[in-house]
Amino acid sequence: MKKSIPWTLAALFLVAFVASFSELQRMRARFGEVTRHHFHDHQDVREFIIRASLDGLDSPIIVFGDSLVEMAELPKSLCGKPVVNAGIGGSQTSDFMRLAPKLVEHSKPSAVVIALGANDPSENAKEASDLIRQLRKLAPIVLSMPTTRDGFAAGDFLKDGIHLTREASVTWVSKITGAIERSIQNCD
């Protein structure tokens, strides 16, 4: 009898351990369901916002670009046409190869500005010309204003080595708006 007590206790402890472990796994899975959050990718959210902004507009001016465009304070309208900021932080030209033609085709813009390049690997320079060529078939005017850092002195115009200071952004936006106004016919 005394020899069976340790075996009985061991069996009871084993059953209790298995039951506890099963319950712990079940609770862990349930806790994971409760605390699981669904986060949206920034690019997906911006794409939705851009589509919503374009919805119902007549001949908008679309400014495609990376974070420099997304952060820019573009005017609401130019030459009597609404301006849509289609900047997506972190994007590369390759991202717009898929997105831009769809947006341009559905919105029938009066002008398209492509301001990309800061995030592009240097070996992808051909993509920019491919994108311009592709969009020229869909939009009457395409302006290309690369957003490479080469045109800015880091100490004076870049606040973090990448993004423009407020003053530099204002200057950059005025160059874009001036180019758009010169390019659109009947712009007074």
Image (spheres, rainbow, N blue to C red):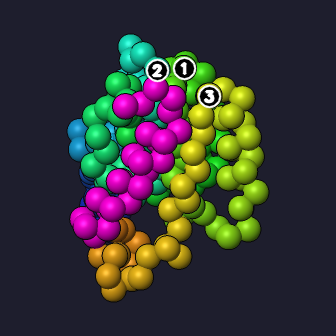
Q: Which residue is mark 1?
A: 108
Place of residue 72 in the rendered image (x, y in percent of width and height, measured from the top left): 32, 52
Image marks 1 and 2: residues in contact by CB distance under 8 Å = yes
Image quadrant holding the N terminus, namely bottom left
Q: Main secondary structure of the magenta part?
A: helix
Residue 46 in which image quadrant: top left
Give the spatial CA distance, label 1 vs label 2: 6 Å
Type of amino acid at the residue the image marks with label 3: Pro
Disc 1: CA contacts within 10 A as few (<14), some (14-19) or many (>=20): some
Q: Residue at x 73, y 68 (%)?
A: 123
Which residue is at the front of the view, 37 or 162?
Answer: 162
Type of amino acid at the residue the image marks with label 2: Ser
Place of residue 43 in the rendered image (x, y in percent of width and height, measured from the top left): 44, 44
Disc 2: CA contacts within 10 A as few (<14), some (14-19) or many (>=20): some
Disc 3: CA contacts within 10 A as few (<14), some (14-19) or many (>=20): few
Q: Is residue 63 above or below residue 61?
A: below
Q: Residue at x 36, y 49 (%)?
A: 70
Label located before the other in sequence (1 or 2):
2
Q: Which residues are magenta?
A: 165-188
Which residue is at the front of the view, 31 or 170?
Answer: 170
Find numbered disc 2 in the image and state the secondary structure of the residue it sits on: loop
Type of amino acid at the residue the image marks with label 1: Lys
Q: Which residue is mark 2?
A: 59
Regarding residue 103, the answer to whether it shows in the image is no
Find numbered disc 3 in the image and state the secondary structure of the residue it sits on: loop
Image marks 3 and 2: residues in contact by CB distance under 8 Å = no
Label located before the other in sequence (3 or 1):
1
Place of residue 35 in the rendered image (x, y in percent of width and height, measured from the top left): 24, 44
Query: Could you say which disc has been placed on residue 140 in the image?
Result: 3
